[in-house]
Image (spheres, rainbow, N blue to C red):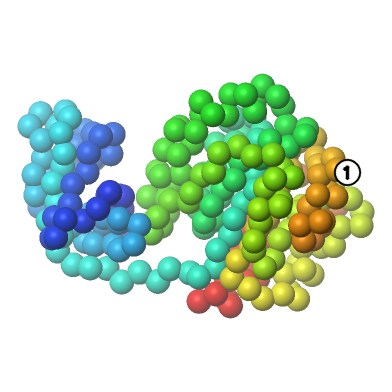
Amino acid sequence: MRRRFFVEKFDGDRAEIRGEAAQHLGRVLRAEPGQLYELSDGTEVWLARVDKIPSGRAGGAIEFALTEKITVVDSSLRIRLLLSLVKFDRMEWCLEKATELGVSEIVLLAAERSEKALIQAAAKRCERWKKILLESAQQSRRLRPPALTATARADAAFGAAHENLKIIFSERVTAQPLGEIVQRVSGREVCIAIGPEGGWTDAEFSAAARSGFREASLGREILRTETAVIAALAVVRYALEKDAS
């Protein structure tokens, strides 16, 4: 299977890759003229032939000639993930797996029980996190990486949610099983909110309810944030993607 890389734009029948991606292609993958890769500008995907490698493979752009447009079927299911900040090693794992599972946008949340030190340090991590999203999207052969929205307060993010199906995951006994919720709805826009390790506060549950979020459960067990991300996205996609083709 050919590797896929993202480019800023296609210029006629030409394209180029610069920066770290070019260094990876040249130094690690040992790209040579004539080799074929897939390139995406976020809208289209083309099969492209390596045309020129910079001298010494250090710096400069790798140039491509576009050879054939690839048909891409992009799901119309759009999932926005409101993800509370957790310890950064787990956070990066969440971002990677959420990308592989097809989220369209990730909004970072400063929940009331998020660690204050994590909230303060999050801004400095955003560039690294965007790189993780980009690399994960390339690896999983997505058309484009998900958008990453800077840290927001939970109540503000709830109020800004516009999707027809909005779900907040809950450990409370009154929460309805997620499987029951998604079986009874249809739609192509979903917003799911996953809390921090300490869980949501009552005030956050109330704010979510006022904004139309439904409390959902992933089972009796208490899941870590990164486990909840995978479980929630897998269930939502399984239930709804068949209606979003």
Q: Name the residue type under label 1.
A: Asp
Q: Is residue 65 left or right of residue 227?
A: left
Nearer the observer, 131 or 232: 131
Could you say which quadrant of the image residue 29 lies in? top left
Task: Measuring from the top left, give residue 160's x and y in whole percent.
Answer: 66, 53
Measured as percent of width and height from the top left, residue 237 is found at 60, 65
Indicate left or right for 144 with 192 as reference.
Answer: left
The residue furthest right is 173
Q: Disc 1 marks which residue?
A: 202
Vertical order, 30 against 51 (above or below): above
Q: Is residue 31 left or right of residue 217?
A: left
* Residue at x 66% of width, y 56% of height: 161
Residue plotted at (70% across, 24% down): 116
Q: Quadrant of residue 140?
A: bottom left
Closer-to-camera residue (231/9): 9
Q: How crowded is the residue under tag 1: few (<14 C-alpha within 10 Å), some, or many (20+)? A: few
Q: Compared with residue 107, is residue 40 higher up or lower down, i.e. above or below?
A: below
Q: In the figure, is residue 40 to the left or right of 163?
A: left
Viewer can see residue 26 = yes
Residue 107 horizontal/vertical position (percent): 59, 45
- Asked if one can make out residue 225 in the rendered structure from this viewpoint, the answer is no
Identified at 69% across, 66% down, the residue is: 165
- Residue nearest the observer in this picture, 123 or 156: 156
Outermost residue toward the top in this view: 117
Query: Which element is circle 1 on?
Result: helix
Q: The N terminus lies in which quarter of the figure?
A: bottom left
Q: Residue at x 35, y 57 (%)?
A: 42
